[in-house]
Structures are given as C-alpha cells and as structure tokens.
Amino acid sequence: MALQSQSKDAQVLKLKDGRDLGYAVYGNPSSSSAPIIFYLHGFPGARVEAKLWLESSLSPAIDAQCIGIDRPGMGLSTFQPNRKMLDFPADLIELAEHLKAEKFHIIGVSGGAPYALACAKQISKNKLISVALCSGLYPGSRDGMLWALRALLFVGYWAPTALMATLFDSKFGRPARDPDPHVTEDFLMAEMQGRPKEDLQCFENTELKTTIADSMRKAFEQGGMGPAWDFRLFSEWGFELAEIDGSHVTIWHGGKDVNTPILMAEEASRSIKGCTFKVFNNETHMSLPYNHVEGILRDLLKL
C-alpha cells in the first residue's frame, strides 16, 4: 500500500464531495496482502490513537497495518454539517477503495464503538471481515456511569450544538491547543482523578499518556464544533442495535468500567444478533485495551 507524500501519521484523502479525510498509518507489514485494520478513535480523540495498537511499546509483533481515521471536524478531517452516524461508513469505504483494501477489519474503542457498529450495519461482510468493540459506548442503561459523564450526555442531547461546542472548546480546547504539550498532559491527568486505580495505572506508561494527550490536541485543532457534533450523535444513533447482524462482531468490556458501564455492554450484547461478548471482571475503561491489546488483535484477525 503506497502512501501519499504526507507523513504516515498525517495523511489526507480528498473525498468525492470535496471534504478532507485525515488518517494515519501504523505497522510495518511484510507484504501488500497483510491485513488492514481501521481504527475508530474514542472521544475526544483523533487518528493517532491507532499508534498504540501496532507501533508502540504496547504493540504485539503482528503482521498487519492499523489505520486511524479522524472523524469530521477533528484532526485533519473537514467538518461535515448535519452529518449522521450512518454517514460515516461511506467515508471509510471511500478510504478503503483509495488504499485498495478489498477486505478489512475494524476496531472501535469507547466513542468509536458506535461508528464501528454503523459500519457493521452498512458494510457487507464480504468486505468487513470482523469488528472488535473495546470499552464501547452503547445506548441503554447508564447505571454505574460517572455522574459527570451521565449529566454531560443529558445536556449534550438537549443543549444547542453551538453551545456545547463553546463549552467543549473552553474546557478541552484551550489546554489542547496550548503550545506546551505538557499543559495538555497535566489537564488530562487532572481529569483522570477519581477514576479507578486501574485506569490511573495505565497512564504511568509515558508513551500511552503522550499519545492520548496528542490525540486530544488533534481532536480540538479546529475548535469545538467537530467534537460537539460527535458527542451529540451519541444520543442520536439513527439505527437500532437489533438491526445488525453481529456474527462478525466481538464486544470486549471491563466489569469495573465507570465510563461505559458493564450494564450498557450487557444490554448491547443481547440486542446485537449473534455477537460474541467477552467480559473481564477486573478491568476498567482504559485497562481493558491496555492489558489485552494482543488478545484483541489476534482474535480480530483470527491468528
């Protein structure tokens, strides 16, 4: 797979409708036939999160390529007014065609899980071979969710998106765009206080901390409207989980997750027909992918 002239972590595809789609490419496959994984980032986040899966100290030695995609209005991707969650699969398909990826896999983490499920609904299983949902956000019960996140989801649904964009940009955008990247890291760690110790222990890994901070910085490069619209869609999926053939979908979830509680995942597993549900009772939102990256990848690729 040949890259354009941009650096591999700052690639841009001009879509047919004129928008830019930002993406990053990680991994060093031995041949052009190595599996391709599209990585759908969390919230707020951007394409560079994908680095943690195939090109970091956490990464297993797996012959594949992992491609992180910026959603509209975040990173290098153009904001898309009035977009719906079900608009995203068409962007991914256009990128897959550009990369000559006839078959591929998808990982959706946290806020990326809804978009992974939109792809599972819209894209043929002849193309989309398997889907892994890690610490995913789903509709349904919010029992066990941090009260601040629960309140934010409620406000995000009812408040004007422009207002949410201002709020997000004031809270996250200012530290994210500070010239000193340590400001972003310090803000991120302050936001993590009060989370389970398993989540905090993950951030003792400097590479993970700097990558997540960089992901947040890129999420707010264009301001708060992209993240605000993304957040709004978490309450407006536009499809039902029961509409999905989940025979190629695996849900990975931690029993101690307080961002996206286990009850939410249990309800989703019952709604998505034929999916596989893997629960790790002692894992949290961050520790699940942190501790199981190799197992998730090997299961996704059937290695």
Image (cartoon, grey):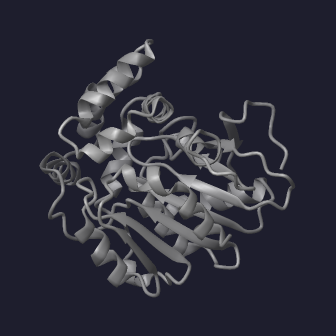
Which of the 4 image quadrants contains residue 83?
bottom left
x, y percent for residue 254: 33, 62
x, y percent for residue 107: 54, 60
The quadrant in which the C terminus is found is bottom right
Instruction: Determine the residue positioned at 44% across, 47% down.
Output: 81
Instruction: Determine the residue positioned at 56% across, 79% down.
Output: 248
Q: Is residue 113 above or below residue 52?
A: below
How many numbered marks does the figure carry? 0
Q: Is residue 290 above or below residue 243?
A: above
x, y percent for residue 108: 49, 59
Between 101 and 135, which is closer to the camera in this rendering?
135
Question: Is residue 167 visible from the viewing direction of this image?
Answer: no
Instruction: Determine the residue positioned at 79% across, 51% down.
Output: 29
Question: Is residue 273 visible from the viewing direction of this image?
Answer: yes
In the image, taking residue 231 as reference, residue 248 lies left or right, namely right
Q: Is residue 256 above or below residue 277?
A: above
Q: Is residue 223 above or below residue 180?
A: below
Instruction: Determine the residue positioned at 23% across, 37% down.
Output: 163
Which of the 4 image quadrants contains residue 35?
bottom right
Between 177 and 156, which is closer to the camera in this rendering?
177
